[in-house]
Image: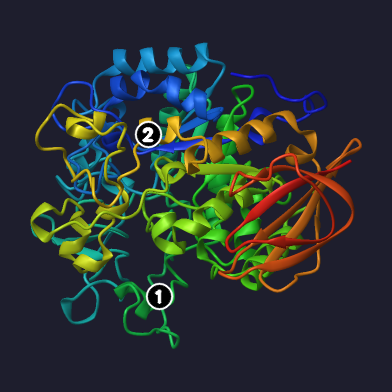
Amino acid sequence: MAEHAPGETGLAWWQREVFYQIYPRSFQDSNGDGNGDLRGIRARLDYVQWLGAGAIWICPFFRSPMADGGYDISDYCDVDPLFGNMDDFTALLDAVHARGMKLVLDLVPNHTSDQHPWFIESRSSRDNPRRDWYVWRDAGPENGAPSNWLSHFGGCAWRLDQATGQYYYHAFLSAQPDLNWRNPELRRAIYDVMRFWLTRGVDGFRVDAVTNLVEDDLLRDDPQNRDYRRGMPPDSVLRRVFTKDRPETHQIVGEMRDVLDEFPDRVLIGEVHLPLARAMAYYGRQRPFFNLPFNFQLMQSDWDCRSLSAAIDQYTQLLPQNAWPNWVLGNHDEKRLATRIGKEQARIAAMLLMTLKGTPFIYNGDELGMRNVPISRFSTRDTRVKTMSHRFSRDGARTPMRWNSGKGSGFTTSTKPWLPLGNKTNPADVASQQEDGGSLLNLYRDLIALRRKSPALIGGAFVPLATRGDVLGYERHESGQRFRMALNMGPREQRFPFDEQFRVVISTVRDRNGERVSGDLLLRPHEGLIAEAD
């Protein structure tokens, strides 16, 4: 891994590095079964290093019946045979560290699989010692569900267990019973899971669905959502007042941070889907919580100059003192970036992501401009479509990486990959883009390389500029280094002022690098550039 620019030694690694998210089942198959695995990830580490990312976040590879893509865990401390074994994990971790890179795992503390030994014991009888490790309640009025709570995946969030006559709560699939975080023994058990992986050398965790950890102990009904509109997810008919972001959650995150801090130089990242002001509380006030509560502002904003300018400003203004920002443009649960904003603006998005102040996260394949692959009902793997509808399937954003144009796209030797490769939807593979100096992939690589060597782009001040037409403009500066970014977010030519002489360092259209600019600069449609002050 290349060295960072001088002057950045005061920042932690998770502030300096670019994170690369890997969905393991779709990254690289090493044994020809059509599924990506840990050995496959290890075989492609040279690519991640070539790209310039310094940290990897891997989605769950733990033992699981795969009812929810591995987020239904039956053993937190073992590798599912689909992905390999513990020796494969150790070899992967060693190979990551040998390259000077970091490895972060998913922690899924809200629920387990219904096949986890804890739940099997819990549901065996009402007086089992682990009964209280999950959320069990008697029937409500008229012998129905205990409350009106809804699952994120559609339908009632309570499931009646015929054997014991009580209901258990599941915020997601019924095969994913929620853990009871009010139980101190359960809390200690999850903290021991954290220590299990931290002791083995992992560099931190991304904590899944953290705002769902605690529910109202009085079982009060969630109120109706007056803003609900047809086409929204079915659970949006209610406002999650009593089933999300309960006050006790902050104490739990503080305890997780205490466990993490037993080990030096680690990071805690939180999946915090909340209105921005409430999400900021997860940095911690009186004590530190998450190093990085995920910032979904760019992903949730309308993709136009004014909306993005407002989203960036709101986020930076609300950021607590001394808190470090982060930026996310895609992940395994959302439509692909290029599908949402188009292939032309995907280049603008890359430049924006790598030049804002804060830690950037890339979802594997977004650096290629991968789009959602159409998945037929016959090929669907996302089980939540059974309780929602096919249009809510996440499969289209989880299809395999296309490494080359050969059979199996370099992903697998199997004739039946677990999801379609999408050759027609995503024709530009890694090999072809590496050879094309003007490709989106090489743009990402050049942007990351520039960021790594430029103190102003890592820790420098962020200075917004006045919006001009469809052009989003801002500057970054530190220690005498000054960059100006001008991003044309529209389909027409735009002029943007340069009040003194600058030199173009990188342009998204790749043909004006090194050009000297001053006065009004004409930006072509969908063109963005980074210019450094002379």
Q: Is residue 239 above or below residue 417?
A: below
Residue 310 quadrant: bottom right
Mark 2 belongs to which amino acid?
Ser
What mark, if any, has residue 220 been given in the picture?
1
**SS at mark 2 in the image:** helix
- State the image coordinates of residue 260 (x, y, percent, origin top left): 57, 30
Q: Earlier in the sequence, mark 2 or mark 1?
A: 1
Q: Residue at x 60, y 49 (%)?
A: 508
Category of crowding for the residue at label 1, using alpha-carbon neighbours closer than 10 angstroms: few (below 14), some (14–19), many (at least 20)? some
Residue of label 2: 432
Mark 1 belongs to which amino acid?
Arg
Query: Is any part of residue 290 visible from this angle?
Result: no
**SS at mark 1 in the image:** loop
Q: Nearer the viewer, residue 341 or 171?
A: 341
- State the image coordinates of residue 271 (x, y, percent, origin top left): 49, 50
Q: Nearer the viewer, residue 110 or 443?
A: 443
Q: Is residue 174 above or below residue 256?
A: below
Q: Which quadrant is the C terminus positioned in? A: top right
